Image (spheres, rainbow, N blue to C red):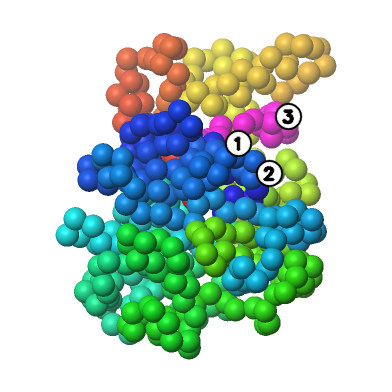
Amino acid sequence: MNLFKDTPLKEKKGTNCVSMSEEGIKCMDTDGILEVWNYTECDSSSPEEVKQQRGLIKDTEGNTILHSFGYTEEYTHVQTDAIREKIGDPADWIFHYSVEGTLLRMFYHGEQWYVCTHKKLNAFKSRWSCKQTFGELLEQGLDDIFQRKGTLEWLQGQLPTTKVYFFLVRSNPQNRIVCHTHHLQKHESIVFLGHYVRDHPLPFCFYEKGVEGEEPAVLRVMESPSALPHPMTTVEEVCQLVSTIDPFVFQGVIAFRKNGMQSVKVLHTDYVKYYQVRGNNPNLRFRYLEVRNQPEQLKLLYVLYPKYTLLFDEYEGTLYQIARVIYQFYVQRYIKNQYITLPREEYLLLKKCHQWYLEDRKNNRIFTQKVLEILANEPPLHLYKMIRRFHYERDVKPRHPLPYARTDMKMEIPVYNQKQNQEFMASLPPLTPPTSPK
């Protein structure tokens, strides 16, 4: 979801972003046969041609193979006038409760089936804050629904290859943002949204469980989007309904235009508030470090994830232990004048401590508590790296602690320590930084 604006995508080494158009439309992934294109930044004021570029599938010659619903306009339930201007007559839209999840499309091309997200051609290579990929979650959910193993491959063999199928993989305890998942049954983890004929994307055939439609019979046992208690006749009625929704169960209401690939979300204001606290960072531990100095945000984060309270407290305890270690290094370096080597983040922290001391040699004294105060203002990424190193030395090799390694290669590294330093840095697991929205 975008929560009013899809943020710019950061370039990463090793990604499949192969080209970019002048309009800010980027090729996010390719397999040499097909390409998936997405905008790099989009909001409600962006041109319509940009909004339609979300998850667009093309061949290598630039021919459009697959469409999507494009950019989803989002409003809170108090923005009645803006919603009325966007939606117009509610009779032209299909309304459902909006749930957290990831939209997957399944289609046949070039003698093979594809299951893709908006940014990856292969959903089995895409994940967010979860050990399992979206493809694996789809596979597992289908197995639970049809009560058999290998359902995905079996299902693909039952479906016409001339259609494009839309599935929503609902959030689970690992990748949930705001909405709780404990009430979901196994067969409810996958929602079948509908389909369209490959060469004729309009009209989109929405699926409604229990109502016979144009969808293949084999899919009629699947769950459909959560229906509203009664039809919506006015925008005020939509906003009133959303105001009564529990934001820990539903985001709000989503509307799909009947005769177009277009969608609009009306979100509960409390959901937006909690979503902004969680952010789009898949690493919840890193997110904690980002908001730990913001009391109001931190309080809401604890409300969102009460089961992570002990983990957050452990991080605070680790930061205190790191402050003690840094103080010991400070004594070695600046009081006992002993030569030491440190990773870059610890070195910069040690340097800041000494700079503070030099501002008033008579009154400024370095103790663990002062180191902790200075540590609290370090960038979250620096804190995360220091915590990862501390846990690695404590847990991975407790009997043989590795020496601290100076990662700033512009500084001199003792020859006798260089090999150990390189081995230590190479053994560290890869860091998971914040990423762009799905």
Question: Which residue lies at the image location 55% right of the left edge and 26% below the top edge?
Answer: 346
Name the amino acid, label 2: Val
Depth-wise, is mark 1 or mark 3 nearer the camera?
1
Depth-wise, is mark 3 or mark 2 nearer the camera?
2
Q: Is residue 141 left or right of residue 334?
A: left
User: Mark 3 vs mark 2: which is more N-terminal?
Assistant: 2
- Relative to 106, does residue 185 appear above or below in the rendering? below
Residue lying furthest right: 363
Magenta portion: prevailing SS class:
helix
Q: Is residue 415 left or right of residue 284?
A: left
Question: Which residue lies at the image location 73% right of the left edge and 29% below the top edge?
Answer: 370
The percent position of residue 209, horizontal first and vertical second, equals: 48, 84
Crowd class of label 2 (few under 14; some 14 to 19; many from 20; radius 10 Å): some
The percent position of residue 78, horizontal first and vertical second, equals: 80, 59
At mark 2, the secondary structure is helix
Residue hosting label 2: 291
Residue hosting label 1: 380
The percent position of residue 13, horizontal first and vertical second, equals: 37, 31
Residue hosting label 3: 370
Give the distance between the C-alpha atoms of the residues marked 1 and 3, in whole angstroms.
18 Å
- Relative to 178, does residue 287 appear above or below in the rendering? above
Question: Which residue lies at the image location 25% right of the left edge and 67% below the top edge?
Answer: 161
At mark 3, the secondary structure is helix
Name the amino acid, label 3: Lys
- Relative to 40, does residue 192 appear above or below in the rendering? below
Q: Which residues are magenta?
A: 368-389
At mark 1, the secondary structure is helix
Crowd class of label 3 (few under 14; some 14 to 19; many from 20; radius 10 Å): some
Magenta stretch: includes residue 31: no
Question: Which residue lies at the image location 37% right of the left edge and 38% below the top edge?
Answer: 27
